[in-house]
Structure formats: structure tokens, C-alpha cells
Image (cartoon, helix red, strand yellow):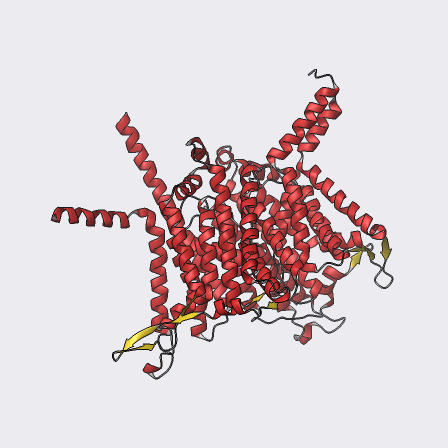
């Protein structure tokens, strides 16, 4: 009896559907290529190599942003500016590391100072931009979607102006290592992502902050009346999202060792929001799941990898993304999940002879 | 008799000074300010005053419309969606898909362009209706539903062709090339305005969509329902209004506008490209917001959106005339403009809320 009730709860849980979807996509991968799960160690770099690692590695930018986005959506908002912030972060970092600034890139003898600046200034600026979003929303009382639309429109312009519309490249080794080195054979972006997820989890679940976010997301006035500083919660959440966008931007620009104000982080906001929603956090705010979001982000990347495997043009991945996401969202939607859990409950009743 | 006309005037003045139009007036005011700035600063760039090489020409205005007709067409549909309190992120992708259908169909497959256009209309309106259905009956947030629609349309674009296809078709060429030059009376003779200014098919399409939009929103039951849903969906439902049907139709109408915008854009660039108009959906939303539409729903006018489009189009035009500024400043200026308008909206909304509260308080007092 108890097991059956668990089943209905599982069917209602949106994270379950996300995991089921991921397993299904992986199964398709396995059927398409039996060697899909094989792992090798690259001899020259000592890095683990394989599709699973690649999926985790390439999904890290979106996963990191989606961690912040989860909190934003749990507040009942959306942050459209993250993609633009990725571009800003990359542009500022590369501004400090232009490879034509010769004195900093002498092999083996680089000054630490510009490197620290190249990492800290972009993160600081992105956090400030996040705070700006938070200010418009918490103090200005604007809708998040509109408030963040401003930086989404402006952000790429700011990134372009930072670098005078030029594309810088760098050969700075420590920067290269952010995305292209490994620790214990695991690529660095995966480690960074794991650390971010862990820190975020500790922050929201081991302090009361996560509960505050859920309370503000469910009813801002009620949470204010029960003594939560809703404005402060909004400020912190948007600042975190800005900071994480900056981290993601550093990884992105370290991968290409260059800044690309036009294409860096393009559609990241959309992917991050999708990851959050697939992961089971409702757009109306309230309860959220960081683990679900991470799974959502991995699902998106798995679909992309799968489509590459079938040799379809990379731009067309969007169509497949859309189809799988449509299935997940329809399964998660209220009427359908209610119907499914009702059926499961009925079956449980039948199994016990309808006695309750 | 005199009294009658007097009261008619009073009624008109009262109607025009209705605070609900204040956002539209703000848009028009800032539009005029920016235009004035443009005409003073870059009114005549050449040293010869007769050369007509500057901002103060009819050509500036017609070019504004020629370059942005597709944006305007899409913004009309978007205004409907925003007034219901929804959002549609798929518009640019659907417009791009229309371009791909027309380009691939006519140039690669040799199909009659009218069939391609009909097929695009079928797909675009169908997708819109489907999204509306999912939003209302499956209760999926509009943002997510239309985002999926956007991914789907973009993906299909790329499945058709990942390369840009230049259109070579007589009908499309004829439609794209059709233009009416503007004439003016000079020394008792009709001569072409110099520098030449013309009206093309896209401008006419834009104006037709605009008028249809105004008629639907202001003069039909459908339009009333749209406002009612945006004001308060629950109340609209309790009043017995066809909420579901209206919402589905609104997304269907927006799909139609997206396809028409796609046709206009295709005629404008005469090619189809799977990545064209990327990010265009937010340009369209920006136009509507600048034009005074509230994203919370219930407030907005097609005419406001029209001025929003013109205002948004004016900025890149001014930066071109300025000549030395990087085009990226256009983005920043648009962002700042958005910020300004949101602040104005905020002030207007909170003051009208305060008014309402005051009114209801006095009403309560009267009752007691």
C-alpha cells in the first residue's frame, strides 16, 4: 500500500519526469551507438574522454547559470540578461589579457596581477549588473522580465564598446586552463560546475535562504508580513545570478581563448530557463530543485549530442530540443500530471480492493 | 446648436485627455523630441542648403517604414498577446521560417510563390493556435510554450537549409520591386520628390495590418474580451466571456502577423536564411513596451505600438546620420529608452492605483 502511494507521489514529482526523459534520451543514444558510454583517457593530456564526459563538460556553462536562474524562477521571475552578461564577462576578461600586451604573457614569467584582475573585474561587473537588475525589481517594483530585458538589450552593446568592437585573442596559459585542463582526469569545467552546485546547495538548503526564496516566490506580501526582508532576498538572488553568469562567461571565453560579443552566450537565457523548467521548478514561483535543474541542463546537452551523432546540421538541434521539451512539459503540465496520478491512485485502489 | 457643438468639443477633449492614453502621449512626446533633435542636429548635412542630403527629408521617413515594416506588422500581433497578459517568443522564428518556405519553395523546388505563402500562413497560424491551446488548456506558462515554439520553428528552418538562399522568382521580384514614388507640386508641375521617396508593398501591408488591428481591438467583441482577459482572467471567466477561445484566437492572430511579417521581411531582403531575425522577438516586445503596452496585461493600444515602432526605428537612423558613433550605441540607447518608459509606466500605474484606492474609499464612505 505504502509503495503505491509513493508511486503516485513520484508521478506527481516533476523531477521524476526529468530523470525519465534523460534515461530515455540516453537509451536512444545507446541504441544509435552501442559504444556511446565508452570512456577513454586521452594520452597527451591525461583527461577522461567520452560522450558522457563531453555532455557534462559542455553543459557546464548552462548548468552554472541555471543554478542562479532556479532561484530567480523560484521567486516567480525570469532573468533575460544572463546571455548578455556572459558576453560582458568575456569582453572584460579579454580586455585585460590582450595577447599584444606583451609584458604579461612572457611564457613562465607572467605577472599575477593582471590575471587576478582579469578574473575579478568581470565577476565584479557582472555581480553589479545583477544588483542593478535586483534594484529595478526590488526597489523599482518592476516585472523581472522587463527589468532584465534592459540589460539584455544593452549588455551586448556594452560588451562591444568595452573592446571597441574588436575580437581579442589571448595565449595566457592560466586562463587557458580554466576550461581546458583537468583535475584527477576530470575536465575543469565539470569540477567548477560541481563546486558551484555544492556551494549553492549548501547556501540554500543549509541556511534558511532557500526557504526565504520559496516564501517570497509564493507570496511576497505574506513573506514580508512574516518578517522576511523580501527586497534583500531579491537583491541577493539577482546578484548571485549575475555572478554565476560571469563565471560562465569566463569558462566560455576560456574555451575559445577569445571574446565574441555577438555570439557569446547567445540564447543562454532561453536554455537556462528551459533547464530550470524541465528540472521541475514552476514558472509561477515557489518550490525549486537545484538537482532537477542540473538534470534539465544535462538533458538539453544530451539532445544536442544525440543530434550531432545522427549527423544532422548543428543548427537543427533546436527542432529536436523543442520536441523533447514539448513532451516533458506536457507531461509535467497540471491537467496531465493530475490525470496520470489519478489513474495511478485508482489502480492502487483496485489493487487493494478499493478499500481506503 | 452652439451648445451642442460646445458639448461635442468638451466630450472630445475629455476623451482625449483621458489618463489612460497618457502612455501613448508620452511615446509621441519623446518621439517628437528625438525627431526635433535629429532635424536640428543633422537636418542638413551638406553645405549646400538645396542638396536635401540630411535628416529633414521625406525620404528619411519613408525609409524608416521601408526598413521596419516587418517589425511593425509583428508588433501589432504582439500587442494583442501582451494585452492578454501573455508573451510570444516565437514570432521572429516563425517569420524566419516563412522566409525559408518562400525561398526554398520558389527557388529550390520551383513551386508557385502563392502556394508557398499559403503554406506558410497555414503553418504559422496553426502553430499559433496550437500554442494558444497548450497555454490555456494545459496551463503551461506562455513563456515556456512559445519558447518551445521558437526552438521548433528555428530548428525546422535549419532542417530546410543551413545556408542563405537568394530568391529568384518573378512574382517575388515584382512584389518586392513594386513601389509608388512620391511626387510634389513644384512650379505648377508634379515632380518626383528629391531625394526619391517611395511607398512599397511592405508599407501598405503594414498599414493594412495596423488598421485591422485597431479595428479588432477597439471595435469588436473580440477586442473587448482581450482587454477583459488581460485585466483579470478570473473575472472574465466568471463574467462568462469565452476566455479559452479568445486566448487561442489571439495566439492564432499573432501567428498570422508573424507570417505576414516574415513575408514583408523576405520581400525586403529577397532571401531566406535560417538565422535571420535572431533576437527579433525581443525587438518586437521592446516596440510594444515603448508604445505603452504593459506586460502585466490589460493595457495597451495598437496606435501606441505604432509610435513605439517608429521611435525604436528612429534611433539607428539617427546614429547613421551622426556618422561617427558605433552602431552598438544604438543598442544602449534602446535599452535606456526602455528603462525610461518603464519608469514612466511605473509612475503612471502607481498614481492610477492610488487614484483608484481613493475613489473606492470615497465610495465606501458614501455607502456608510
Q: Residue furthest left?
A: B2
Q: Residue at x 63, y 42 (%)?
A: A329
Residue drawn at the location 35% of the way across and 46% of the way down: B219
Task: Tell me where residue A216 sits by quadrant.
Answer: top right
The C terminus of chain A lies in quadrant: top right
Residue B304 falls in which quadrant of the image?
bottom left
Rendering coords of residue B262 (x, y %): 52, 59
Q: Residue at x 62, y 40 (%)?
A: A281
Q: Does residue A207 show up?
A: no
Judging depth in this view, the residue of A215 and B12 nearest the camera is B12
User: Which residue appears farthest toward the bottom when viewing the image?
Assistant: B48
Viewer-nearest residue: B139 or A245? B139
Residue B289 in view of the camera: yes
- Say if A293 sits above or below A173 in the image: above
Foreground residue among A94 and A56: A56
Q: Is residue A108 left or right of residue B208?
A: right
The quarter of the rendered structure image containing the N terminus of chain A is top right
The x and y percentages for residue A258 are 66, 67
* Residue B41 left/right relative to A35: left
Question: Front-most of A274 and A252?
Answer: A274
Asked where in the image residue A290 lies, by quadrant, the reply is top right
Above or below, comparing residue B231 to residue B174 in the picture: above
Which x, y percent locates residue B350? 38, 44
Amino acid at each position: 500500500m505504502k509503495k503505491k502511494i509513493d508511486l503516485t507521489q513520484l508521478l506527481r514529482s516533476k523531477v521524476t519526469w526529468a530523470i525519465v526523459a534523460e534515461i530515455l534520451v540516453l537509451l536512444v543514444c545507446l541504441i544509435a551507438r552501442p559504444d556511446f558510454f565508452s570512456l577513454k583517457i586521452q594520452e597527451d593530456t591525461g583527461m577522461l574522454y567520452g560522450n558522457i564526459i563531453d555532455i557534462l563538460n559542455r553543459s557546464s556553462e548552462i548548468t552554472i547559470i541555471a543554478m542562479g536562474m532556479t532561484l530567480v524562477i523560484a521567486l516567480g521571475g525570469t532573468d533575460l540578461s544572463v546571455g548578455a552578461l556572459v558576453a560582458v564577462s568575456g569582453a572584460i576578461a579579454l580586455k585585460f589579457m590582450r595577447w599584444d600586451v606583451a609584458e604579461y604573457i612572457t611564457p613562465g614569467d607572467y605577472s599575477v596581477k593582471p590575471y587576478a584582475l582579469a578574473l575579478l573585474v568581470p565577476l565584479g561587473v557582472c555581480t553589479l549588473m545583477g544588483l542593478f537588475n535586483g534594484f529595478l525589481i526590488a526597489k523599482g517594483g518592476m516585472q523581472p522580465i522587463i527589468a532584465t530585458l534592459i540589460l539584455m538589450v544593452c549588455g551586448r552593446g556594452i560588451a562591444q564598446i568595452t573592446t571597441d568592437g574588436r575580437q581579442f585573442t589571448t595565449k595566457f596559459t592560466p586562463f587557458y586552463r580554466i576550461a581546458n585542463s583537468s583535475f584527477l582526469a576530470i575536465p575543469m569545467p565539470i569540477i567548477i560546475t560541481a563546486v558551484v552546485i555544492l556551494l549553492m546547495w549548501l547556501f540554500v538548503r543549509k541556511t534558511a535562504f532557500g526557504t526565504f526564496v520559496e516564501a517570497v516566490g509564493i507570496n511576497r506580501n505574506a513573506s514580508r508580513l512574516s518578517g522576511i526582508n523580501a527586497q534583500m532576498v531579491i537583491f541577493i538572488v539577482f546578484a548571485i545570478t549575475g555572478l554565476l553568469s560571469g563565471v560562465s562567461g569566463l569558462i566560455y571565453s576560456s574555451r575559445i581563448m577569445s571574446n565574441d560579443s555577438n555570439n557569446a552566450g547567445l540564447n543562454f537565457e532561453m536554455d537556462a530557463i528551459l533547464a530550470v523548467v524541465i528540472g521541475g521548478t514552476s514558472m509561477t514561483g515557489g518550490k525549486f530543485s537545484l538537482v532537477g535543474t542540473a538534470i534539465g541542463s544535462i538533458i538539453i546537452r544530451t539532445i544536442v549530442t544525440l543530434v550531432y551523432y545522427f549527423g544532422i546540421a548543428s543548427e537543427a538541434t533546436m527542432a529536436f530540443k523543442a520536441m523533447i521539451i514539448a513532451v516533458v512539459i506536457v507531461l509535467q503540465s497540471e491537467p496531465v500530471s493530475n490525470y496520470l496520478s489519478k489513474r495511478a491512485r485508482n489502480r492502487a485502489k483496485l489493487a487493494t480492493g478499493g478499500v481506503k | 446648436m452652439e451648445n451642442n457643438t460646445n458639448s461635442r468639443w468638451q466630450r472630445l477633449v475629455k476623451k482625449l485627455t483621458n489618463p489612460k492614453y497618457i502612455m501613448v502621449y508620452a511615446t509621441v512626446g519623446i518621439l517628437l523630441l528625438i525627431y526635433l533633435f535629429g532635424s536640428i542636429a543633422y537636418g542638413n548635412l551638406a553645405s549646400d542648403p538645396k542638396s536635401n542630403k540630411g535628416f529633414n527629408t521625406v525620404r528619411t521617413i519613408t525609409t524608416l517604414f521601408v526598413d521596419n515594416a516587418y517589425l511593425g506588422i509583428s508588433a501589432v500581433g504582439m500587442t494583442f498577446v501582451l494585452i492578454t497578459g501573455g508573451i510570444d517568443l516565437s514570432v521572429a522564428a516563425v517569420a524566419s521560417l516563412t522566409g525559408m518556405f518562400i525561398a526554398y519553395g520558389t527557388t529550390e523546388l520551383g513551386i508557385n510563390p502563392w502556394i508557398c505563402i499559403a503554406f506558410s500562413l497555414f503553418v504559422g497560424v496553426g502553430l499559433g493556435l496550437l500554442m494558444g491551446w497548450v497555454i490555456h488548456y494545459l496551463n503551461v506558462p506562455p513563456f515556456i510554450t512559445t519558447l518551445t515554439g521558437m526552438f521548433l520553428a528555428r530548428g525546422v528552418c535549419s532542417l530546410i537549409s543551413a545556408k542563405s538562399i537568394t530568391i529568384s522568382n518573378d512574382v517575388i521580384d515584382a512584389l518586392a520591386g513594386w513601389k509608388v514614388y512620391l511626387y510634389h507640386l513644384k512650379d505648377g508641375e508634379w515632380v518626383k520628390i528629391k531625394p526619391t521617396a517611395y511607398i512599397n508593398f511592405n508599407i501598405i501591408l503594414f498599414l493594412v495590418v495596423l488598421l485591422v488591428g485597431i479595428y479588432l481591438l477597439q471595435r469588436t467583441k473580440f477586442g473587448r474580451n482581450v482587454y477583459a482577459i488581460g485585466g483579470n482572467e478570473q473575472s472574465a471567466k466568471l463574467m462568462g466571456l469565452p476566455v479559452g477561445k479568445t486566448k487561442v484566437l489571439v495566439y492564432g492572430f499573432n501567428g498570422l502577423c508573424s507570417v505576414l511579417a516574415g513575408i514583408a521581411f523576405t520581400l525586403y531582403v529577397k532571401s531566406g536564411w535560417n538565422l535571420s531575425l535572431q533576437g527579433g522577438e525581443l525587438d518586437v516586445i521592446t516596440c510594444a513596451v515603448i508604445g505603452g503596452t504593459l506586460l502585466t496585461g490589460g493595457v495597451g493600444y495598437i496606435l501606441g505600438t505604432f509610435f513605439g515602432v517608429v521611435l525604436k526605428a528612429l534611433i539607428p537612423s539617427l546614429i547613421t546620420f551622426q556618422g561617427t558613433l558605433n552602431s552598438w550605441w544604438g543598442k544602449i540607447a534602446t535599452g535606456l529608452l526602455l528603462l525610461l518608459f518603464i519608469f514612466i509606466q511605473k509612475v503612471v500605474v502607481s498614481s492610477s492605483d492610488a487614484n483608484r484606492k481613493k475613489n473606492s474609499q470615497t465610495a465606501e464612505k458614501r455607502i456608510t
